[in-house]
Image (cartoon, grey):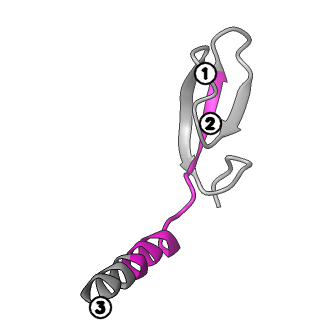
Amino acid sequence: MKKAFLISVFCLLLGHAWVQAAPAPFQLWQSKLTGRYLCSQHKPGEGWVWHAGPFDNAGCRPR
C-alpha cells in the first residue's frame, strides 16, 4: 500500500513538471559561409554563429 502511494505521488509530481515545461526560445543564426540568416530553436550546426535572440516566435521578430 505504501509503495503504491509513493508511486502515485511520484507520478503526480512528474506530471506537474511536464505541464510547466515551456518550448525553447527561437534564436537568429547567421551562416559563416553565405551570410544568410536562419531562425531556429537549436543551433543548426558548426557553420552557423548566433546573431540575435531570444525571440518567442518562429519569425525571430520582436512583439
Highlighted magenta segment, given as a residue range: 11-30
Mark 1 / mark 3, whichever is N-terminal: 3
SS at mark 2? strand
Q: CA distance from mark 1 to mark 3?
A: 51 Å
Mark 2 / mark 1, whichever is N-terminal: 2
Q: CA distance from mark 2 to mark 1?
A: 13 Å
The type of residue carrying mark 3 is Met
Identify the residue at horizontal 44%, vertical 78% (top origin).
Answer: 16
Report the quarter where the C terminus lies.
bottom right
**Residue indicated by mark 2:** 28
The location of residue 22, given as percent across then percent down, is 53, 64
Left of 8 or right of it: where is 42?
right
In the rendering, which numbered label is found on residue 3?
A: none
Give the foreground label among 3 and 2. 3
Where is residue 30, by image quadrant? top right
Q: Mark 2, residues whose alpha carbon is within 10 Å: few (<14), some, or many (≥20)?
A: many
